[in-house]
Amino acid sequence: MSNDKLKRVKSKMKNFKRITALFASAVLLVSFAGCSTGETTAQIISKTSKLGSYSGKVDLNADVSMQGSEIKYGMSSDISVKTEPFFAEVNITTSSDDPSLGGQYQSKMYLTTNDGVNTAYVGYNGEWNKQIIKADSFKYAVSQYNPVDNAVLFMQSATNLSNVGTEQFNGYTADKYEGTIAKGLIPDLMESTGAISLVGQNIDSSYYENAEDIPVTIWVNEEDGIIVGYKLDLTNLVNHLFDKLNESKTATDENQKLKAVSYLCEAVITDYNNEINTTLPEEALNAALIVDDTQNDSSAADGNS
């Protein structure tokens, strides 16, 4: 892995942050009030949060128009997680029909906690590196790939959330919940869950000013009361962000402006309370250790966040 690419990976690891427990508690009260039938959101969130292991998939897909041409690009990630001691295996595929965006490539990541030490192993193009990660950055490294953590955050944050009926979803008989995420919560959620990661870097909260609430759909296994999937249609939000980006670049020609034809964030939890293989491959175990000068030994061994 080149130094530039490794820096980008490390930067992404450090940039993700989780919404505070106080914030989560506040929005939980709102979402609880909006639930009409079936299990309450408080029960669903509690059951889903307590999963000891799970596997799932997150898909981000964008269709963007510029200069009369459409560009499709996306990121698909498969993840398996064991929560105690923490272990995560992530397989990531990024693809685009525009060669300038890199075509298609795959990468792999493992995160483990052993004796209070958090280690990330990153493999790309046959090269592996490993790094000791501070507790406050560790699990955020996979935040955008984690359908369970993100599903819980979206349900906590949703308002006017209602059970609109039961349907088949990815092999489950599932209660379908629909609601909206208030615009004031959007900047933190988009960053902490990575749902906006295909749009670009350096998008701060000012870009979200005057954005509209966004719709969210969440599916819950009717039998177990566990979240098994979600969908966010972020097309209108991304067009709002593109308008801000176009303004910042003083783009006046309509053909030069970025426009989102569609931008979808979808996830499924394919299995839970399942057996997870936590054996690391030799190439990961033998990877070169990357030393981050911003971390010291005591912060590296803080343990789980």
Image (tube, rainbow, N blue to C red):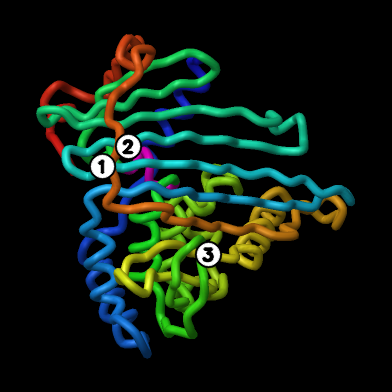
Identified by mark 1, the residue type is Lys
Which residue appears at 31% of the width and 87% of the height?
33
Helix, strand or loop for disc 2: strand
- Judging depth in this view, the residue of 56 and 215 nearest the camera is 56
On the picture, is 171 further left or further right than 104?
left
CB atoms at circles 1 and 2 under 8 Å apart?
yes
Residue 241, percent across and down? Answer: 62, 59
Is residue 223 at least partly visible in the picture? yes
Q: Is residue 72 left or right of residue 51?
A: right
| Residue indicated by mark 3 | 231
Q: Nearer the viewer, residue 37 or 244?
A: 37
Q: Are marks 1 and 3 in contact (CB under 8 Å)?
A: no
Q: Main secondary structure of the magenta part?
A: helix
Q: CA distance from mark 1 to mark 2?
A: 6 Å
Mark sitting earlier along the chain (1/3): 1
The residue lying toward the viewer, choosing from 70 and 39, is 39
Residue wearing tag 1: 82
* Residue visible at 27% across and 30% down in the picture: 278
Specify start and end residues of the magenta stretch as a single range: 140-144
Residue 224 coordinates in the image, percent (x, y): 30, 69
Quadrant of the image occupied by residue 42: bottom left
Q: CA distance from mark 3 to mark 2?
A: 23 Å
Q: Secondary structure at mark 1?
A: strand
- Residue type at mark 3? Lys
Q: Earlier in the sequence, mark 1 or mark 2?
A: 1
Q: How many marks?
A: 3
**Residue 297 picture location, percent across and down:** 14, 21
Q: Amino acid at mark 2?
A: Ala
